[in-house]
Image (spheres, rainbow, N blue to C red):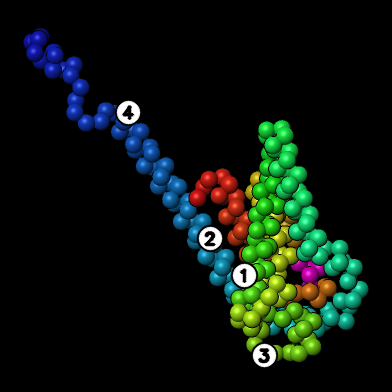
Amino acid sequence: MNVTNWAMDKLPVNGPDANTIAHASGAGKGANLVEGGKLRSLKIWVGMLVATVVAIAVSIRWLDAPVALALHPHAGRYSGLGNSFDSSILVRGEIIVIAALAIARLAWGTLPAYARALFLASCASLIAFEANEYILKVIFGRKTPVEFLQAPAAYPFNLLQGDDHSSFPSGHMVMATTFAVVIGRNIPGTAPFLITMLGFGAFALLLGDWHFVSDTLAGAFVGWTAGLMATRIWNREI
């Protein structure tokens, strides 16, 4: 064999070798899968938004006033339930949970998976609740069912004239749904129970005449969005 040819065969060829090319190809496919997953998530969210808007419109047109009127005579029976689950009590409870878990984390250096999920759920639901109370409710400015029945109005919203006592979206549903979504996505097997409890919670809000049907639908959507965002940020998917 010619020595020169043998030496040339042993020299590295300019450009990436096979392993480098394979690694780059794999990385490219991974990036495409991630982008595809984000696009699918966005499509699902947009679809849910459209479905929620349609459901709210239908509810305002045909359900809200009749349901509120039908349940109003019985609302007084459930005042104790409202006092027990007043939003101020729930907020204080979540702050206590957050503080306790933070202290435990500092003391022990780590937390079990269920405790981390509880910490995230409490933080996310508290933030979502406060944003709803002081931003969304102020924007939509909707009267509560009791106020509406005392002075009915043709147009349901008083834009930019609301406060934290306004009705739309339901703050309780925002808080509960955010909490449930985070727990359900981080602790396997809990979703059926949490969905059932959300259904009971929404019915209780109607039963006590605290909210319209559309208020609970909007609150559930806002909470679902907040729960998904919190989980994805926590898992560094965004």
Residue at image position (39%, 42%) is 29
What is the distance, in whole Å, between disc 1 and disc 2 at their CAs?
A: 25 Å
Q: Which mark is residue 226?
A: none
Point out the stretch of residues depicted in magenta. Answer: 200-206
Question: Crowding near pointer 2: few (<14 within 10 Å), some, many (20+)?
Answer: few
- The residue that disc 2 covers is 44
Instruction: Indicate which disc residue 19 carries.
Output: 4
* Secondary structure of the residue carrying numbered label 4: helix
Q: Residues within 10 Å of mark 4 (few under 14, many from 20)?
A: few
Q: Does label 3 or label 2 sit earlier along the sequence?
A: 2
Count neighbours of disc 3 (C-alpha within 10 A) and say few if under 14, some if 14 to 19, many if 20 or more.
few
Residue 160's image quarter? bottom right
Q: Residue at x 58, y 70 (%)?
A: 51
Q: Which residue has dot 3 on it?
A: 154
Q: Nearer the viewer, mark 4 or mark 1?
A: 1
Q: Is residue 164 left or right of residue 7?
A: right
Q: Examine the rendered structure and indicate whether residue 28 appears above or below residue 180.
A: above
Q: How far is mark 1 from mark 3, CA to CA?
A: 24 Å
Amino acid at pointer 2: Ile
**Between discs 4 and 3, the one toward the N terminus:** 4
Q: Is residue 52 left or right of residue 95?
A: left
**Majority secondary structure in the magenta region:** helix
Answer with mark 4 or mark 1, whichever residue precedes in sequence.
Answer: 4
The residue that disc 1 covers is 135
Q: CA distance from mark 4 to mark 3?
A: 69 Å
Separation of marks 2 and 4 at Cα, in angstroms: 37 Å
Q: Is residue 172 magenta?
A: no
Hey, what amino acid is under mark 3? Ala
Q: Residue at x 25, y 30 (%)?
A: 16
Residue drawn 70% across the image and 38% down it: 105
Q: Are marks 4 and 3 in contact (CB under 8 Å)?
A: no
